[in-house]
Image (cartoon, grey):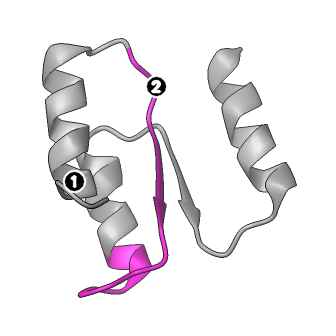
Amino acid sequence: MPDKEGLETIMELRRDFPEVKIIAISRGGRVKPEEYLDLADKLGAHRKLTKPFVREELLAAVQELLE
């Protein structure tokens, strides 16, 4: 994301909108995607996907969170 880190966004969303469902998506960067997504999970992400992923994985995660 150009203006802010994803982990920062997750923290803000959990603080301001605790009921919102979050899917964290990463391909890595400064850290391995697994490490980043583990942090996202600890901060309150409900699902996590590692890039690249197939459309069906994303759709399944969205469907699961809508139930």
Spatial distance from mark 2 to mark 1, Cα to Cα? Answer: 14 Å
Residue at the disc numbered 1: 7
Image mark for residue 35: none
Residue farthest to the right, as pictured:
56
Q: Is residue 44 left or right of residue 3?
A: right
**For residue 67, what is the image quadrant?**
top right
Give, as a single range, the part of the protein colored magenta: 20-35
As for residue 27 lying within the magenta part, the answer is yes
Label 1: element kind: helix
Q: Residues within 10 Å of mark 2 (few under 14, many from 20)?
A: some
Residue at the disc numbered 2: 21
Asked if the residue under mark 1 is in contact with the one under mark 2, i.e. CB atoms within 8 Å, the reply is: no
Residue 54 image point, x, y percent: 81, 64
Residue 39 image point, x, y percent: 26, 60
Q: Nearer the viewer, residue 3 or 61?
A: 3
Amino acid of disc 2 = Lys
Amino acid of disc 1 = Leu
